[in-house]
Structures are given as structure tokens and as C-alpha cells.
Amino acid sequence: MKKIHKAVMLIIDGLGDRPIDEFGGLTPLEAARTPCFDMLARGGITGLMDPLSPGIRVGTDVGHLALFGYNPLKVYWGRGPIEAVGVGINLRPGDVALRCNFATVDENFVIINRRAGRIRNTAPLAAALDNMSLGDGMRAIFKPATEHRAVLVLSGDRLSAEITNSDPGPVSEGEPVREVKPKHPGQPLAEKTARLVNEFVRKSYEILRDHEMNKERLKKGLPPANIVITRGAGMAVKMRSLTERFDIKGCCVTGESTIAGVAQMAGFSVLMNEKLTANIDTDLDEKARLTLEGLKTADLVVTHIKGVDLVAHDHRPREKLAFIEKTDQMLQKIIDGLDDPQDTFVAVTADHSTPCVIGEHSADPVPVLIHGEGVLVDEVRSYGERACARGGLCRIRANDFLLSLLDLMGVTYRFGS
Ligand SMILES: [Zn+2]
């Protein structure tokens, strides 16, 4: 039997960036003190990676699908179903899943705060909406997700995901909640689904408005989470898992339900607990501990870091730099705790760039590296956007990056005789 090597793949969400004036034209990663990443770059092979292909900007879900070995053009379900899997809902074919936000509206349904002040611990609010009757024997499944997010699933055989969003979008304070409509006129299934979602949104306001937790929030001067708004409707399709395809065991450490969803679809087990907040206050020591725990049984452990992306969206390069440095220290702890450091590959990558100047995802490629036995060490001495442009992996796509790692691990198959 061939020997399988283990690997840790660290995904730093939104890592890539552009020159920052206050760092003398360096990126946050280039300006950060990252002894561990640099040690891995010196002793490993580096490169630049496009999530899909040059010039294509991707979302976190698509970037992760690609890093888990899928062609998102073929298997993308929409964000709703990914989130649903991530919060532990077992989707059946034909179910329609939607991403939701708890939000704050006034009595005319005008949005005051689209994330209800990034409310956390929404389980009591979600429980009040779960199993809601929408008529025709239809019931809503509703579960809380990370922070202000949640998931709505409608089960039935006569539904359609071809519907619009009730959420008016990222910069929508002052705009009213939208009525959900079929994307194309004259689709009875989409009309019915839109009607059900509109009813859910309206009832969510009636139920949440007077909820005890919101009364408490008002007393503290916090925005009440008095409505649920929806987006990203999608339907589940069947796909073969990565772990089945290569006969490996996978484990994912994350605080984010979207990543947990993609990982579970790929056949990975997920290690997640309340110490992992998917924000900059997450417990990185706990993440290191869970990564080492995962390695005891899994061949490949994927550890995901969200905070770097969040502060980049908020145009905060200094916080991005600081969190990159903390992530570097976390990876050093993981390496120090490895049972068999000689026989474990360490890969560092990202799902996309989020330059602080624009505060949005960009198509800039991200720096990547693989460290471990037998890699063709290149001349790159540090881990950064410009340094890795000279690396031996050259410019690679996310699918190919994962496959290259799997090949080094010894789990791929020969094509041909
Ligand atoms: Zn992302």
C-alpha cells in the first residue's frame, strides 16, 4: 500500500492586497512581521494563485469551492444551500435554501441597520421562527448561522429558486425591504415560492418585533433584530465529494458556516465551537489546537481564518496587518505541535484578494506556498504578493493548487497506463 502523507492547508480569507501608502507602498502582508510564513516560503515552493482564472472576481463561497477541488461553474448551488449544509440542515432534492440576515427596520419596513448591529447569539430569535407554518401544509425551517446571518429552507416538490432577494443589498440603509418576485415572469413555481418567502419575511417582523431579546436590546440602546431579510436562493444538486474521489479523510476547522458548508459538501468533518467567532476576536489558540486534533485522524486538515477579510472590507490596513501577524503565530504553534513534522505538508493560501483601499474582493491573484518533503524549493525568501510572483509554482489556479498538494501527499491517481 502506498504511503499517504498528511497536510495542513491554511486558508487566509481575503489575504491578497494592493500597495498601501502608510506602509510605504507595501501590502499589509508584505509589511507584516511573519517569521513562520517566511520560513515556509524559504524552505518551500511558492507562487501566485487565481481562484478561477485571471480577472475573475469571486465570492468566498466560489473561492472555497475551487480550493476544495470543485469547478464552481459546474457545481455552484448558490450561497443559500451552502449555508444550509453549514448549519447542519440535511437538504433534500427540490428544497430551496436562502441566506438570511437579521436586520433592523422601522414600522414601514425601511432598513435602519442591515445586520442588526452584527448581532450574535441569535438562537432564541431563530427558534421563534423555526417551523413556522406558511399555509398549504408548508413549513419553514429556520436556523441561525454566523453572527447576524441565518438560513431559511422551504421543503416541497413544487418550488423554484428562480426568485429575487428581499434584502436590498450591502448599502441599503434607508431603503425599504423588497418584495420577492420571480426572476422571470410567468413561472408559477417561482411565483408560489416568492409568495411563501414574502409571507415568511412579513411574519418574521410580527414575531420578532415583540420578542423578549429585542426588548432587552432596545433597553441597552442596541438595534433590535426585528426582521429577517433573504437573498441567494438556491437548490441542492448532487455532487461527488472530494474525500470520496481521492479516498482520503478530511477535516475543516472554521468558525464560519459558509466554509463549514463547502467543507461538508466535500466530505470533510468540521471542527467548530463557540470560541471560533469568524471575526478578529476568534480564539486562534483554539484553532491551532483543533487543527492538531484534526490531524490525528484526518489526512488533510483545512484551517480557515476569516478576520483578515472582514477588516479589509472595512478599509482597515493596520488591523489587517496585525491579524496577519497573529495568524502567522498561530501557524507556528501548529507546526510546533505536529506529531510528525517531517511527514506533514504545510500549505498557505487564500480564497481571493480583498484590497483595503477598495474594501471589496478583487481579481488580484493571491500568494501561495507549499512546504514539505520533496518540493522543489525555489529562490523566494519571504511570503508576499510580489515575492511569490517569482516562485516555482508560477501562476496557478485554485483547483490545480489543491491537486498539486494532493499529489505531493501521494493520494492522486495516474492518468494513463
Ligand atoms: Zn473570502
Image (cartoon, rainbow, N blue to C red):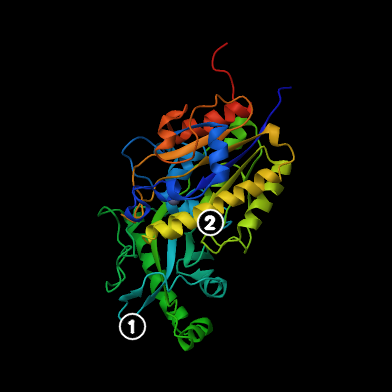
Q: Nearer the viewer, residue 370 or 379?
A: 379
Query: Seen in the image, is 73 located left or right of residue 298?
Result: left
Q: Which mark is residue 259?
A: none
Secondary-structure class at tag 1: loop
Observer-nearest residue: 144 or 118? 118
Q: Is the CB–ligand 1 distance for label 2 below 8 Å?
A: no
Report whether residue 138 is seen: no
Residue 262 rendering spot, x and y as whole percentages: 52, 47
Rendered-image quadrant of the C terminus: top right
Circle 2 packing at 10 Å, graded few (<14), some (14-19), many (20+), is many
Residue position marked by numbered label 1 in the rendering:
107
Q: Position of residue 410 (x, y in %)?
A: 63, 26
Amino acid carrying label 2: it is: Ser
The residue to which callout 2 is attached is: 257
Q: Secondary structure at mark 2?
A: helix
Q: CA distance from mark 2 to mark 1?
A: 31 Å
